[in-house]
Image (spheres, grey):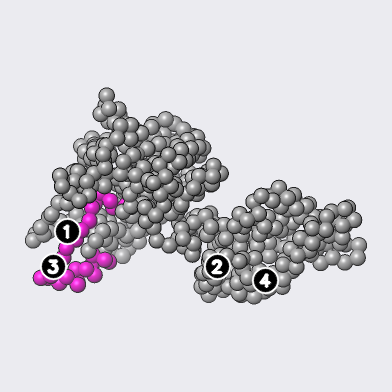
Amino acid sequence: EDEAQDSSRMQEDILRLLVGSDGNWIRVGDPNQAIYETFTTASPYYLINFLNESGVTDKKLSNSGRSSTGIIALANYLIDWTRSEHPVLSLRNSLNYPLIEPAPPGDPQPNPPFLPNSIYISTEKYTPDQELNMITKSAGRWVKDNPDSTVAILVPRNERGSKVIAELNAKNIPNHEMLNSTDSTRNTARLLADILSFLDSPSQPTRLAKVYSGIHLHGGENKANQSVIDANAALIKKCPRLEDYLFPWPGRDWLGNLAVKGYSTEILTGFSEFRDLIIRWLSASLLQIDQLLLTISMDIFINPADLALTHKLALALERAARTHPDWRLSQYVQELNLIASNERRFLGFTTEDIGFDPDQHKGKVVVSTIHKAKGLEWDRVYMLSVNNYDFPSAEEGDSFISERWFIRDKLNLQAETISRLEALISGDTPGLYMEEGFATQKSRLEYASERLRLLFVGITRARKELSITSNNGKRGEAKPALPLAILSEYWKDKLS
């Protein structure tokens, strides 16, 4: 069993049945890389408890040739500090021994050489935009100077990753993303959502103008003509009555009025062709959602990846329609927007979506969440947003993503509900009446524990060079995460 630190209770039970009482069970895993606990049923304690069972032989595999000795020292100090000095006592078992040891002499995978100034740890309180600008500039320079090496920007959440991608694109820095969905997938889903949004409310010029811009700019082919496209969209937005454009009649002909005002034949022809598309889609809007999407895609997409992706989206929405027969277009728009905003995992058919090997992307900045980076490695790694919101330590003043300010006492409603359900299933009557807030506090500790392991995983993705920075969050209230401050002081002392 590989990656045994990610076992769940069901997986554990199934494997025990398969092994039997006299079977042979080899479990390979690293509890320090258990980073899925807070959003799946996985837990490292199944492996840890297994190691303490009678008859189990524990074999340590502590040597690693992935990283330089400097990066190994940093990761090891995080383990040592967590085990012996973390101010929250219940978090001291978040990371486990043994410490990482460099590869022995003669190993076929020797450690990369430790380079001077190869590790940068900052506790400066950058704003999110300042951090973004600084890191993308640095990564762009590094890629230009090291075209035959690999580099990654690792983020704690997809939302931050999307902003990194946008900034890299704005700076024309070559990149490759490993987020819930790729930029091309999100753009296609966004365009389809905009079209359905207009069809749901076909009297709004603003929505139609957005569709016009989206169709003409999709794929980036017409980027050079953006100013013309924006001007044409602005004209549509000012149309007082869309029916005068889409279904003209004598005395009510918006396009005819533009001709009278002297607009070019090219513009008038373009608006006329666009009108034909919209009328066709309005006529098709009574079709089932999958048929409607496929009709739209055949009219606007040429790229095989876009066509295949739309087919996949159509199948997904058709399944949703069977589950929710009362849904209208607005609900399908919401589903597509979840993909467009990177809040839902959805793989398309571009090369970015299928498989990944860092060495295939030398000369590009790879952007990934730390979770998806597990098991991979790059010559240089940037870690962003290591603040006390994305990496809380369960100390006073830390904020938690699962606790909403508008909920009484900032209770984690999901944790409180699950606690009651577990008590109900197990027949634990006192647990049903447990004091409110107990499950919330327990969830905080579990989340902070996993975040320590996530930080460890991020650090150990770097082979030669590592940069770790923080920002003060959306409201300007976040501060550098406690482990970041500790690692910064440790590294300063080590260099002095």
Locate the N terminus by quadrant: bottom left
Residue 23 at x, y percent in the picture: 12, 70
Residue 488 at x, y percent in the picture: 32, 31
Q: Judge depth for marks 4 and 2 and give the one in front.
A: 2
Q: Which residues are magenta?
A: 10-35
Label 2 neighbourhood size at 10 Å, few (<14), some (14-19), many (20+)? Answer: few
In the rendered view, does 468 fall on the left or right side of 232? left
Label 3 neighbourhood size at 10 Å, few (<14), some (14-19), many (20+)? Answer: few
- State yes or no: discs 2 and 1 in contact (Cβ < 8 Å): no
Give the residue furthest to the left.
55
Residue beneath label 1, please? Answer: 50
- State yes or no: discs 3 and 1 in contact (Cβ < 8 Å): no
In the rendered view, does 295 fall on the left or right side of 406? right
Q: CA distance from mark 2 to mark 1?
A: 49 Å
Label located before the other in sequence (2 or 1): 1
Q: Identify residue type, mark 3.
A: Asn
Q: Identify residue type, mark 1.
A: Phe
Q: Identify residue type, mark 4.
A: Ser
Q: Judge depth for marks 1 and 4 and give the one in front.
A: 4
Residue beneath label 3, please? Answer: 24
- State yes or no: discs 1 and 4 in contact (Cβ < 8 Å): no
Marker disc for residue 304: 2
Residue 41 at x, y percent in the picture: 32, 60
Label located before the other in sequence (4 or 2): 4
Label located before the other in sequence (1 or 4): 1
Residue beneath label 4, please? Answer: 285
Q: CA distance from mark 1 to mark 4?
A: 57 Å
Q: CA distance from mark 2 to mark 3?
A: 49 Å
Label 4 neighbourhood size at 10 Å, few (<14), some (14-19), many (20+)? Answer: some
Q: Which element carries disc 2, helix, strand or loop?
A: helix
